[in-house]
Image: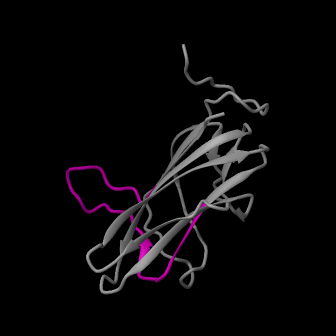
Amino acid sequence: MGGWSNSNTSSGGGGGNYGSFRSELTQPLVSIPYDSTPISTELTEESNGVSVNPLSGNIEFTTFGLYMVEATILFRHNAPLSADTGFVWIQKGGFNVAGSTRQTRLNQNIFLTTLTLSYMVNIASVSDTIRLYFTTSSIDIEIYYDSTVSGIPNSSSVIINVFQIA
Protein backbone atom coordinates (compact mmCIF):
# COMPACT_ATOMS: atom_id res chain seq x y z
CA MET A 1 0.00 0.00 0.00
CA GLY A 2 1.08 3.56 -0.71
CA GLY A 3 1.04 6.41 1.72
CA TRP A 4 3.22 8.85 3.54
CA SER A 5 6.29 7.76 5.44
CA ASN A 6 7.07 9.70 8.56
CA SER A 7 10.81 9.89 7.97
CA ASN A 8 12.30 12.91 9.72
CA THR A 9 15.89 12.51 8.59
CA SER A 10 18.08 14.89 6.62
CA SER A 11 18.80 12.30 3.91
CA GLY A 12 16.15 13.61 1.50
CA GLY A 13 13.64 11.67 -0.53
CA GLY A 14 10.71 9.85 0.96
CA GLY A 15 7.91 12.19 1.78
CA GLY A 16 5.65 12.68 4.70
CA ASN A 17 6.91 16.07 5.86
CA TYR A 18 4.29 18.78 5.90
CA GLY A 19 3.14 21.97 7.54
CA SER A 20 -0.14 23.87 7.54
CA PHE A 21 -0.04 27.49 8.68
CA ARG A 22 -2.54 30.34 8.73
CA SER A 23 -3.15 33.86 9.94
CA GLU A 24 -5.96 35.65 11.72
CA LEU A 25 -4.38 39.07 11.14
CA THR A 26 -5.27 41.83 8.72
CA GLN A 27 -1.93 42.64 7.11
CA PRO A 28 -1.41 46.04 5.46
CA LEU A 29 1.69 47.05 3.52
CA VAL A 30 4.46 48.10 5.87
CA SER A 31 5.66 50.78 3.48
CA ILE A 32 4.80 52.41 0.15
CA PRO A 33 3.23 50.49 -2.76
CA TYR A 34 5.46 47.95 -4.50
CA ASP A 35 7.66 47.45 -1.42
CA SER A 36 8.08 43.85 -0.22
CA THR A 37 6.09 42.98 2.90
CA PRO A 38 6.52 39.58 4.58
CA ILE A 39 3.33 37.56 5.03
CA SER A 40 2.65 36.50 8.61
CA THR A 41 1.42 33.06 9.63
CA GLU A 42 1.14 33.09 13.39
CA LEU A 43 -0.89 29.87 13.74
CA THR A 44 0.25 26.31 13.03
CA GLU A 45 -2.52 23.82 12.29
CA GLU A 46 -0.41 20.73 11.55
CA SER A 47 3.33 20.17 11.34
CA ASN A 48 5.71 17.28 10.72
CA GLY A 49 9.22 18.30 9.67
CA VAL A 50 8.06 21.71 8.37
CA SER A 51 7.60 24.63 10.77
CA VAL A 52 7.50 28.42 11.01
CA ASN A 53 10.34 29.99 12.97
CA PRO A 54 8.59 32.29 15.51
CA LEU A 55 11.42 34.86 15.41
CA SER A 56 12.07 35.18 11.66
CA GLY A 57 8.72 34.01 10.27
CA ASN A 58 10.60 31.77 7.83
CA ILE A 59 9.32 28.31 6.97
CA GLU A 60 11.99 25.78 7.94
CA PHE A 61 12.57 22.13 6.98
CA THR A 62 14.12 19.13 8.74
CA THR A 63 14.47 17.15 5.49
CA PHE A 64 15.63 18.30 2.08
CA GLY A 65 13.66 17.38 -1.03
CA LEU A 66 10.99 18.72 -3.37
CA TYR A 67 8.11 20.51 -1.65
CA MET A 68 4.78 21.83 -2.92
CA VAL A 69 3.86 25.23 -1.50
CA GLU A 70 0.19 26.13 -1.72
CA ALA A 71 -1.16 29.41 -0.42
CA THR A 72 -4.52 31.14 -0.33
CA ILE A 73 -4.51 34.87 0.44
CA LEU A 74 -7.64 37.00 1.02
CA PHE A 75 -7.22 40.56 -0.28
CA ARG A 76 -9.54 43.47 0.53
CA HIS A 77 -9.79 46.67 -1.49
CA ASN A 78 -10.53 49.72 0.65
CA ALA A 79 -10.87 52.24 -2.22
CA PRO A 80 -13.27 50.65 -4.69
CA LEU A 81 -13.28 53.63 -7.04
CA SER A 82 -9.85 52.67 -8.36
CA ALA A 83 -8.40 49.52 -9.90
CA ASP A 84 -5.40 48.10 -8.08
CA THR A 85 -3.32 44.90 -8.06
CA GLY A 86 -2.07 42.59 -5.30
CA PHE A 87 1.03 40.41 -5.75
CA VAL A 88 2.33 37.37 -3.80
CA TRP A 89 5.62 35.49 -4.32
CA ILE A 90 8.09 33.15 -2.64
CA GLN A 91 11.56 33.93 -1.36
CA LYS A 92 13.99 31.09 -0.72
CA GLY A 93 17.02 31.87 1.42
CA GLY A 94 16.21 35.59 1.18
CA PHE A 95 16.08 35.66 -2.65
CA ASN A 96 13.00 35.94 -4.87
CA VAL A 97 12.07 32.66 -6.57
CA ALA A 98 11.82 33.33 -10.31
CA GLY A 99 8.36 32.62 -11.74
CA SER A 100 6.65 32.30 -8.35
CA THR A 101 4.73 35.62 -8.45
CA ARG A 102 0.94 35.52 -8.64
CA GLN A 103 -1.30 38.57 -8.94
CA THR A 104 -4.92 39.56 -8.63
CA ARG A 105 -6.73 42.70 -9.76
CA LEU A 106 -9.35 44.46 -7.64
CA ASN A 107 -11.57 47.14 -9.15
CA GLN A 108 -14.81 49.06 -8.64
CA ASN A 109 -16.99 45.99 -8.22
CA ILE A 110 -14.54 43.74 -6.38
CA PHE A 111 -13.97 44.45 -2.69
CA LEU A 112 -12.66 41.00 -1.69
CA THR A 113 -10.78 38.45 -3.75
CA THR A 114 -8.78 35.33 -3.08
CA LEU A 115 -5.37 34.84 -4.64
CA THR A 116 -3.95 31.32 -4.85
CA LEU A 117 -0.37 30.27 -5.35
CA SER A 118 0.87 26.75 -6.04
CA TYR A 119 4.58 26.25 -6.64
CA MET A 120 7.20 23.51 -6.22
CA VAL A 121 10.37 24.46 -4.35
CA ASN A 122 13.53 22.37 -4.15
CA ILE A 123 14.93 22.40 -0.62
CA ALA A 124 18.55 21.37 -1.25
CA SER A 125 19.70 21.68 2.36
CA VAL A 126 17.98 21.66 5.72
CA SER A 127 19.33 25.19 6.16
CA ASP A 128 17.15 26.39 3.23
CA THR A 129 14.12 28.44 4.31
CA ILE A 130 11.21 30.01 2.44
CA ARG A 131 8.92 32.93 3.13
CA LEU A 132 5.99 34.40 1.25
CA TYR A 133 5.90 38.12 0.52
CA PHE A 134 3.31 40.48 -0.88
CA THR A 135 2.98 43.95 -2.27
CA THR A 136 0.24 45.97 -3.92
CA SER A 137 -0.07 48.81 -6.38
CA SER A 138 -1.85 50.90 -3.73
CA ILE A 139 -1.93 51.19 0.05
CA ASP A 140 -5.71 50.76 -0.33
CA ILE A 141 -5.26 46.96 -0.65
CA GLU A 142 -4.49 44.74 2.34
CA ILE A 143 -4.48 41.08 3.27
CA TYR A 144 -7.73 40.77 5.19
CA TYR A 145 -8.92 38.66 8.12
CA ASP A 146 -12.71 38.42 7.92
CA SER A 147 -14.49 37.66 11.17
CA THR A 148 -17.76 39.38 10.24
CA VAL A 149 -19.92 36.46 9.07
CA SER A 150 -21.78 34.88 11.95
CA GLY A 151 -22.72 31.22 12.09
CA ILE A 152 -19.76 29.98 10.03
CA PRO A 153 -16.01 29.82 10.70
CA ASN A 154 -14.00 33.01 10.21
CA SER A 155 -12.06 33.46 6.96
CA SER A 156 -8.34 33.23 7.61
CA SER A 157 -6.40 35.97 5.88
CA VAL A 158 -3.64 33.54 4.88
CA ILE A 159 -3.46 29.76 4.58
CA ILE A 160 -0.15 28.17 3.59
CA ASN A 161 0.24 24.41 3.15
CA VAL A 162 3.67 22.92 2.46
CA PHE A 163 4.17 19.23 1.80
CA GLN A 164 7.06 17.11 0.61
CA ILE A 165 6.43 15.36 -2.70
CA ALA A 166 9.87 13.80 -3.32
Indicate whether residue 144 is drawn in magenta: yes
Q: Quadrant of residue 154?
A: bottom left
Judge from the rendering whether residue 20 lies leftward or rightward of residue 153; answer left or right.
right
Indicate whether residue 152 is drawn in magenta: yes
Q: Which residue is drawn at 26% across and 63% down?
A: 148
Highlighted magenta segment, given as a residue range: 132-158
Name of the residue lying farthest toward the left = 151
Q: Please say if 137 is above or below 53.
A: below
Judge from the rendering whether residue 55 lies leftward or rightward of residue 4; answer left or right.
right
Name of the residue lying farthest toward the top = 1
- The residue lying toward the viewer, choosing from 120 and 129, is 120
Magenta span: predominant SS is: loop
Q: In which quarter of the image is the N terminus?
A: top right
Q: Residue at x 41, y 80 (%)?
A: 84
- The residue lying toward the viewer, choosing from 100 and 42, is 100
Q: In which quarter of the image is residue 4?
A: top right
